[in-house]
Amino acid sequence: MSDVAISQDTSQRELDRLAELAEDVIRRARAAGASQAEVSASIDAGLSVNVRLGEVETVEHTRDRGFGLTVYFGKRKGSASTADLHADSIQATLDQACAIAQYTEEDEAAGLADASRMASQFPDLDLWHPWQLDTPQAIALGQQIEAAGRAHAGISNSEGASVQVGESLSVYANSHGFVGRERGTRHSLSLALIAGEEAGMQRDYWYDSVRSASDFINARELGDKAAERTLARVGARRLSTRQSPVMFAPEVARGLIGHLVGAVSGGALYRRASFLLDHAGKQILPAWLNIVERPHLQRGQGSGAFDAEGVATRDSTLVENGVLARYILGSYSARKLGLESTGNAGGIHNLVVEPGHADGGPADDFSGMLRRLGTGLMVTEVMGQGVNTITGDYSRGAAGFWVENGEIAYPVEEITIAANLREMYQGIVAVGADVDTRSHLLTGSILIDRMTIAGE
């Protein structure tokens, strides 16, 4: 029997209970004079085990509850929350939200999303896969992953293996009569290792994150991958300052897409804090490149039938033939901009960067992307906060590999890569077919024609 507290049998009952609570609180809010109200309620349960050098370091069981209420008195808004679902705490939260609303300024953009936009279809997106793993089994799995990694010659130490089991139930309801229920699981395995001695020590890691434990790579494979990545960094050098093509490995490339998402999201736009302000309908990427949001992918990391305001999600193009087709908006930011919600309150749902390149034809796998890079830098890690989304200036510490004639030549470290995001996006040469599925931002490797590398 799993140690995690939400079983397959009780999850629907728990959702029913959260839904009844949410609807009851909304009725009470309306009775207290609120013109509109919305509630988010959740229960999260999990097991986390960390193993280092074969010994158990930590075992943590979690069961967290959350309840948030927002009330609107006309255009005045009040919000309050609690982690306690008992009746007294819920009533105190309701009283507090109503009191806050009496003292806030009116905001013309405040209020629920439009009633006509509420989701009415709730397809099964295959997100609920409880993992029947008890604590001894989780410990044994962590030990197995770590042992596989430490068995490689040259691995000198371990920062430990982690096994995490997670289950989440949530309900969003509002005074339009909308009640949306979601249940999902997220499980992860990871291992971090150290190779070499003293000044030559290198660290790297690998992890896997899935909705269903049946989709994990096996323990030995994960341990081997972490070891191979760590050993590959031994003997890393610095580069001299230069300009060259730069290829971002998939797990780093999705950060570039994250910066794009941030720059075209409503909050940055209505605050006028984006380098892509007023760029809807304009070319921001090469003409061969498309980016599409697909909220209903089976087992997707970002799948959902509705957003954080109950607005129905749907497949929607973000970038078409390099042109920014729309912004990423919830109802509040949409009203501030004089636009309509795009069903993105709470964030993006499975953004797919379609693989390809300017030459047409099939997309390249990882080896093909290295050949297309030819001679240049392949980045596997970025560090620091050097991204300015107002100006687009990009400057990050980086590590990775120098590539010559399409083959990895040697590892590099202690360098800085710099450019402007506007130029980087226009300079994308290819997106690989080696898609990293461990995130809601789905992209393969991204090759950029030229960046400045600052080194020795």
Image (cartoon, rainbow, N blue to C red):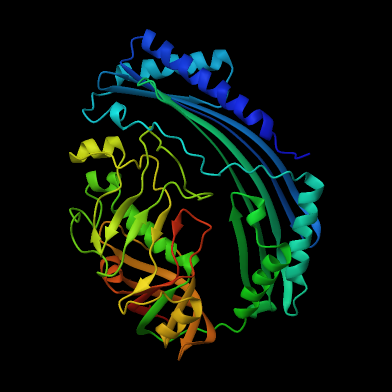
Residue nearest the viewer, comparing 18 with 382: 18
The answer to whether 6 is drawn above or below residue 390 in the figure is above
The answer to whether 415 is drawn above or below residue 53 in the figure is below
Give coordinates of residue 97: x percent, y percent.
40, 19
Q: Give the quadrant of residue 307.
A: top left
- Residue 174 horizontal side relative to residue 157, left or right: left
Give coordinates of residue 424: x percent, y percent.
30, 70
Residue nearest the viewer, comparing 242 with 19: 19
- Residue 15 horizontal side relative to residue 150, left or right: left
Q: Is residue 262 visible?
A: yes
The answer to whether 120 is drawn above or below residue 280 in the figure is above
User: Which quarter of the rendering shows the N terminus?
Assistant: top right
Q: Which residue is pictured at 40% across the width and 75% down the height?
A: 362
- Badge count: 0
- Residue 342 horizontal side relative to residue 226, left or right: left
Q: Which residue is pictured at 29% across the width and 74% down the height?
A: 427
Q: Residue lying farthest bottom?
A: 405
Q: Residue lying farthest top?
A: 31
Give coordinates of residue 348: x percent, y percent.
39, 48
Q: Give the quadrant of residue 174.
A: top left
User: Which quarter of the rendering shows the C terminus?
Assistant: bottom left
Give coordinates of residue 273: x percent, y percent.
25, 51
Q: Which residue is pictured at 20% across the width and 40% down the height?
A: 339
Residue nearest the viewer, comparing 188 with 123: 123
Q: Is residue 114 visible?
A: no
Residue nearest the viewer, comparing 315 with 32: 315
